[in-house]
Image (cartoon, rainbow, N blue to C red):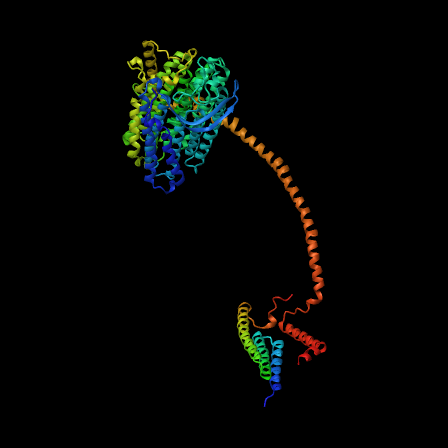
């Protein structure tokens, strides 16, 4: 029988993987994917607690976050494509126009 | 009974037709096809001629003393109070009005009639020239200005036309403006005329100041209402407010003893106006522009520099005859200047080799004749000669144009000859004109020239002698021209000779019509000796009213029959002598002209170089003016530019340097100080901005961790409470 802790650990694991991805990877597409991981870690958390407390609001929020993630992916990828057309790179350390 | 009728009521149409087509040509002429240009421009002058003819016929229907039709279109210069040199202030007004009286009848018919023929001729002459529409635009503009000049009812409006014809003359002399000599000649004509015009406008101002009006006559205008009790007298200036004409004012002033006969102010007016006439009508010393004006196309020489514009001075003097007749001194000056010009120009014409130059000097000489006539008080004889001269001189110039056309542009009579068979129509009409200008009975020139000589004989014998000799010289140079051009063998180059051809019909037809007038044109002045009644003089008499008996010009004395016949025979004899000499020189070659020339080389040189007048003028006036300009130029460069402009520039630069320093060190300095301070303060924080978002993400994470740790420490109570 899976307890709430399993779910929380899975979410924690996903979150940590995502954070490590965001911090360490240079490729912004991978960074974007890592952010998706973080979001889904939160989703798992929300659904788990929703089940635990029998409150459906958590699941509703999870659905909102999925929609939000889709929009974010669309906008984020759009920005990346536009940037790639201008600079021919998707590496984060080369995106330094605003650096002093 | 005042004359009326459609044409008289529409006098203003006469100058309007050419103005409209001139505007059309000069604004959109480039887009109008050639045939359209010809039809419009010639047609408008033709319409003017028809209207002029109609108006003259309607005027002739009235009794001689009523033959004045005056029409004021609008007030041009609105009335204003003006102080005269004597007397109370008057209302000065100049209107845009047209006046038709016997004098302007003659002029308007000559201008539109001869003008129309020359326009027709130009269609043929200019057919292959560039700027066809421009040429006709200027010609029509000239017609407008000339008609304004002769139809104007006051001096100021006349001056508008006067300047207008001067402008058109300039434009047409310089028609081939790419040619340096043509544009120079145009400039010369314009500048020399400026000298005359300065005198003319001073004369107009003096007329206005003295008489309070510039209108020629109040005859033909509706009478002003006067509110005077019967028997009440008013000073003449008040009695004739603003609408009075020069003639009426002059008579009133003389009656009131405000002016005396021969008063200095009248002489001054007459002489100033005559300076204008000297410029426009090419009299000594202002004649130098006319020979150079031959640079223009030949129809222009015919229309402007022979038939119409150059006679404007004669017309003006006759128009102002009321003033001239009251100033015997001025009349004498006119006569002497005219006589000297006549003989002086004729002597230069004797040796010229350019066909148009001969005719140009001949024109000057004939204009001198006209002024000689005016000066001896024979005003109608002067106008008579003006009219006949317009016919035969226009014909001579058009014939010369036809010759030049046939000779592929050659103008030197030494390279012509033998054209009698080759261009018969031109040659015969030219011959008629030659007979007319020489004054052979019964051609037109005989009557007018004889009239002038007869009057001069009575007035002053020396003047008659001068005119008499001039008549002989005229016959000589005209027949010399005729023989060299048309008789003998052809001296042209072979390819030119092969190319000789008669001109197109558009050119020949005007020649024939003008030839007709050169024959019969003088008959309206058929002298009484031959059983005529000299209708022309009777016709002009109303314009010449108010003649003072003292000048002897009142009624030209009619000498005894025998004396008059004798004078005619004498002038015919000297004309015959001139002809005989020319015949011996250039036809039979019994006497070689070169021999005569080499016998008196000095005289020949003097004549050939036109008395070196151009050179003298250059040395005396032109180069001195240039020196003055150079001096002014140096003054300009050193003082105006050096001290004024450069000084101002230096000051401005100095001021701006100061201002720049202030700007740079104070205004910008403060600004930069603020920026530097901000930079300095931001120095430690700057290192956080790596520009790499992973480091930002790390910072966010660390911050989050710190925040969470904080909450864990301090807010555990709150969190636990919710559990």
B46 is higher (above) or lower (below) than B283 = below
Q: Where is residue B170 in the image (x, y as percent from the top left)?
A: 44, 32
Q: Where is residue B86 in the image (x, y as percent from the top left)?
A: 52, 18
Q: In which quarter of the image is the N terminus of chain B?
A: top left
Q: Which of B610 and A99 is in front in this view?
A: A99
Q: Position of residue B340 (x, y in %)?
A: 44, 19
Residue placed furthest toward the bottom: A1
- Residue B227 in the figure: left or right of residue A31: left
Q: Can residue B352 be seen in this view?
A: no
Q: Image quadrant of residue A83?
A: bottom right
Q: Image quadrant of residue B394?
A: top left
Q: Is residue B61 visible?
A: yes
Q: Which of B91 and B688 is in front in this view?
A: B91
At 58% from the left and 34% from the top, the residue drawn is: B633
- Residue B234 in the figure: left or right of residue B722: left
- Residue B9 in the figure: left or right of residue B244: left
Q: Which of B484 and B334 is in front in this view?
A: B334
């Amino acid at each position: 029988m899976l307890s709430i802790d399993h779910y929380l650990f899975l979410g924690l694991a996903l979150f940590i993987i995502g954070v490590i991805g965001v911090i360490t990877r240079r490729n912004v597409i991978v960074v974007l994917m890592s952010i998706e991981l973080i979001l889904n870690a939160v989703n798992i958390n929300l659904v788990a607690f929703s089940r635990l407390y029998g409150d459906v609001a958590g699941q509703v929020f999870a659905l909102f976050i999925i929609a939000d993630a889709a929009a974010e992916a669309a906008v984020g990828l759009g920005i990346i494509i536009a940037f790639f057309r201008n600079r021919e790179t998707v590496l984060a350390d080369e995106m330094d126009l605003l650096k002093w | 009974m005042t004359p009326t009728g459609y044409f008289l009521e529409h006098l203003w149409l006469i100058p309007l037709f050419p103005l409209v087509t001139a505007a059309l040509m000069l604004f959109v002429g480039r887009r109008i096809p050639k045939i359209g240009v010809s039809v419009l421009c010639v047609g408008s002058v033709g319409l003017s001629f028809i209207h002029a003819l109609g108006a003259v016929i309607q005027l002739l229907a009235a009794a001689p003393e009523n033959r004045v039709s005056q029409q004021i279109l609008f007030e041009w210069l609105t009335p204003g109070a003006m102080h005269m040199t004597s007397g109370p202030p008057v209302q000065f007004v100049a209107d845009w009005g047209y006046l038709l009286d016997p004098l302007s009848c003659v002029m308007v018919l000559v201008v539109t009639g001869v003008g129309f023929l020359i326009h027709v001729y130009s269609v043929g002459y200019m057919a292959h020239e560039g700027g066809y529409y421009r040429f006709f635009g200027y010609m029509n503009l000239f017609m407008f200005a000339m008609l304004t000049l002769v139809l104007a009812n006051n001096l100021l409006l006349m001056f508008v036309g006067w300047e207008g014809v001067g402008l058109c003359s300039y434009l047409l002399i310089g028609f081939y403006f790419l040619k340096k000599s043509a544009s120079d000649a145009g400039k010369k004509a314009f500048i020399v005329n400026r000298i005359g015009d300065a005198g003319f406008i001073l004369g107009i101002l003096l007329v206005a100041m003295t008489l309070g009006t510039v209108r020629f006559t109040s005859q033909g205008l509706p009478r002003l209402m006067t509110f005077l009790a019967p028997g009440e007298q008013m000073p003449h200036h008040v009695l004739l407010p603003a609408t009075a004409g020069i003639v009426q004012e002059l008579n009133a002033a003389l009656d009131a003893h405000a002016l005396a006969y021969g008063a200095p102010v009248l002489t001054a007016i007459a002489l100033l106006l005559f300076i204008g006439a000297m410029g426009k009508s090419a009299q000594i010393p202002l004649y130098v522009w006319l020979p150079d004006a031959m640079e223009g196309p030949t129809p222009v020489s015919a229309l402007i520099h022979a038939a119409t514009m150059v006679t404007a001075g004669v017309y003006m003097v006759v128009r102002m005859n009321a003033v001239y007749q009251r100033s015997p001194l001025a009349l004498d000056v006119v006569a002497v200047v005219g006589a000297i010009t006549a003989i002086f120009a004729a002597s230069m014409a004797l040796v010229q080799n350019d066909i148009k130059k001969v005719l140009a000097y001949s024109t000057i000489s004939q204009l001198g004749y006209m002024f000689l006539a005016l000066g001896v008080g024979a005003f109608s004889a002067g106008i008579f000669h003006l009219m006949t001269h317009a016919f035969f001189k226009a014909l001579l110039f058009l014939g010369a144009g036809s010759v030049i056309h046939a000779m592929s542009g050659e103008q030197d009579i030494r390279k012509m000859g033998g054209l009698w068979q080759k261009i018969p129509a031109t040659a015969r009409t030219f011959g008629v004109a030659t007979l007319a200008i020489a004054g052979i009975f019964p051609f037109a020139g005989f009557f007018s020239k004889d009239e002038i000589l007869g009057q001069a004989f009575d007035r002053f014998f020396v003047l008659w002698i001068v005119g008499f000799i001039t008549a002989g010289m005229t016959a000589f140079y005209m027949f010399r021209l005729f023989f060299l051009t048309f008789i003998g063998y052809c001296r042209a180059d072979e390819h030119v000779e092969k190319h000789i051809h008669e001109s197109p019909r558009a050119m020949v037809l005007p020649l024939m019509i003008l030839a007709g007038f050169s024959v019969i044109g003088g008959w309206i002045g058929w002298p009484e000796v031959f059983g005529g009644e000299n209708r022309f003089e009777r016709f002009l008499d109303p314009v010449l009213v108010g003649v003072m008996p003292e000048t002897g010009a009142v009624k030209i004395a009619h000498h005894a029959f025998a004396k008059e016949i004798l004078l005619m025979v004498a002038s015919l004899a000297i004309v015959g002598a001139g002809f005989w000499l020319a015949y011996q020189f250039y036809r039979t070659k019994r006497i070689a002209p070169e021999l005569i020339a080499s016998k008196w080389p000095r005289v020949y040189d003097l004549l050939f170089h036109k008395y070196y007048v151009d050179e003298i003028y250059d040395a005396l006036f032109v180069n001195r003016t240039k020196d003055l300009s150079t001096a002014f130029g140096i003054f300009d460069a050193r003082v105006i530019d050096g001290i004024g402009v450069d000084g101002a520039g230096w000051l401005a630069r100095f001021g701006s340097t100061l201002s720049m320093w202030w700007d740079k060190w104070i205004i910008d300095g403060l600004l930069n100080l603020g920026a530097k301070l901000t930079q300095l303060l931001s120095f430690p924080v700057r290192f956080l901005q790596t520009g790499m978002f992973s480091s930002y993400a790390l910072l966010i994470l660390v911050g989050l961790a710190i925040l969470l740790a904080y909450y864990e420490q301090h807010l555990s109570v709150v969190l636990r409470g919710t559990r």
